[in-house]
Image: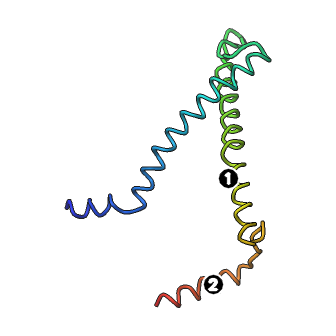
């Protein structure tokens, strides 16, 4: 039983997944600090209020607390912007440069469904 568990744990996918989770958590802390300590203070300097959770709309003796939702939406958008501009855009640029160095096209060639199915069939035939 332990031998099977050891084989499972030592597979590349499990180890890679564990590393990805740890790196994701560490990177999440960096992004949260960027948003909380740099971007939100800039928004506060422009709009004057860092926390909108106290915003309430009263409607027929009922309070609709939309401020917390607004704060969460703003934080989400800022995190999404930070991830795009600090991770996605640079990685896309690096990938494009890598493809150019190798002499490859910036865009992948269009492949029809029949060509794809033919490639799959040929790949399966070579396995046998």
Which label lies toward us, 1 or 2? 1
Up the image or down, 19 lies above or below 12; here it is above
Up the image or down, 117 lies above or below 109; here it is below
Residue plotted at (69% across, 32% down): 78
Q: In the orientation shown, which residue stands out farthest toward the right?
A: 46
Residue situated in front as seen by the camera: 113 or 119:
119
Q: CA distance from mark 1 to mark 2?
A: 29 Å
Residue situated in front as seen by the camera: 124 or 27:
27
Up the image or down, 12 lies above or below 33; here it is below
Residue that mark 1 sits on:
91
Give the image quarter of residue 73: top right
Dots 1 and 2: beta carbons under 8 Å? no
Q: Secondary structure at mark 1?
A: helix
Q: Earlier in the sequence, mark 1 or mark 2?
A: 1
Give the image quarter of residue 86: top right
Instruction: Tell me residue 99's x, y (percent).
Output: 72, 66
Give the image quarter of residue 116: bottom right
Residue plotted at (43% across, 60% down): 13
Q: Is residue 62 left or right of residue 4?
A: right
Instruction: Tell me residue 58's x, y (percent).
Output: 71, 11
Residue that mark 2 sits on:
119
Mark 1 crowd level (few <14, some 14–19, many ≥20, 10 Å Cα): few
Report the disc number at residue 58: none
Instruction: Tell me residue 24's x, y (percent).
Output: 52, 43
Q: In the orientation shown, which residue stands out farthest toward the left?
A: 1
Residue plotted at (74% across, 77% down): 111
């Amino acid at each position: 039983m332990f031998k099977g568990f050891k084989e499972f744990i030592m597979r590349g996918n499990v180890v890679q997944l564990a590393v990805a989770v740890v790196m994701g958590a560490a990177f999440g802390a960096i992004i949260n600090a960027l948003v909380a300590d740099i971007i939100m203070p800039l928004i506060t300097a422009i709009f004057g209020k860092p926390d909108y959770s106290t915003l309430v709309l009263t409607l027929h003796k009922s309070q609709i607390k939309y401020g917390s939702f607004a704060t969460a939406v703003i934080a989400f958008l800022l995190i999404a912007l930070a991830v795009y501009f600090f991770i996605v855009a640079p990685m896309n640029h690096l990938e494009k440069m890598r493809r150019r160095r190798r002499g490859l096209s910036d865009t992948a060639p269009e492949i029809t469904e029949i060509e794809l199915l033919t490639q799959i069939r040929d790949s399966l035939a070579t396995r046998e």
